[in-house]
Amino acid sequence: MKFPQTEAFLCARSKIESLLFGSSEIQPNPNPFLQKEGATFVTLLLNGTLRGCIGSLLAHRPLWEDLRENGYNAAFHDFRFAPLTADEYPHIIIEISVLTEPKPLQFASMEDLRSRIVPGRDGVIYSFQGYRATFLPQVWEQLPDFYQFFSHLSQKAGCGIDPQFDGSEIAVYQVDRYHE
């Protein structure tokens, strides 16, 4: 079954528009694809620059609802940005990433890990001593160097700029990516 892009982007925008403009939220689409459980990330771009990105790593609700909530949270609750304004909204482009189920990756060393991860294909979840962060596969476009990628990911997790591989847990996933 083909991903219903038009309906998916409407879901991602509905709660944002409701809050910004007082419009009614759209009702769940009867499209069977959007009714099944799924995990998504919604990324907002303003003039080609990141403006917000929030998502779910594990499927726990219907795709339409995941898109709606993640769109809303990317617009108003990404701690890296002030809440989206009505003036910015017309210039926002949305990107949707639909995730596969994350799979734990066993590795013996940093070099072993490097040989098991495919940059550009694999999204990565890094966990160390109770801290956790993820980068979508598209982050490899900005951080193509393996060590630089993991340094930023470790920093995002709150573990400093020197990633620890001994004792860390790594999981990978892939995405189907859609742009407006």
Image (cartoon, helix red, strand yellow):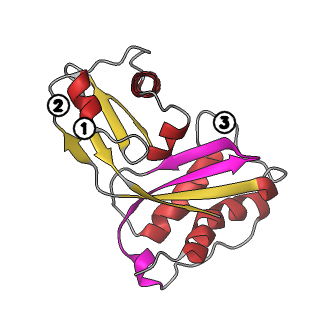
Report x, y in % for residue 33. Answer: 42, 78
Q: Is residue 94 left or right of residue 68?
A: right
Q: Which residue is mark 1?
A: 116
Residue 101, quarter of picture: bottom left
Q: CA distance from mark 2 to mark 1?
A: 8 Å
Spot occupied by residue 142 in the image (x, y as percentages of width and height):
56, 35
- Asked if labels 1 and 2 touch by Cβ distance under 8 angstroms, the answer is yes
Q: Badge 1 local density, few (<14 within 10 Å), some, or many (20+)? A: some
- Earlier along the polypeptide chain: callout 2 or callout 3? 3
Question: Which portion, as a residue range, is magenta?
Answer: 31-55
Camera-side residue of 57 and 161: 161
What secondary structure is found at the residue carrying circle 2? Answer: loop
What's the residue type where badge 3 is placed? Phe
Q: Position of residue 174 (x, y in %)?
A: 36, 53
Residue at 33% in and 54% down:
58
Q: Position of residue 146 (x, y in %)?
A: 40, 27
| Residue 22 as seen in the image, left or right of residue 57 | right
Q: Of discs 3 and 1, which sits in the foreground?
A: 1
Name the image quarter holding the C terminus. bottom right
Q: Which element type, helix, strand or loop, lies under badge 3?
A: loop
Q: Earlier in the sequence, mark 3 or mark 1?
A: 3
- Tell me the element at label 1: helix
Of the numbered discs 2 and 1, the one sitting upstream in the chain is 2
Q: Residue at x 24, y 30 (%)?
A: 113
Residue 107 - label: 2
* Three-letter residue code for mark 1: Arg
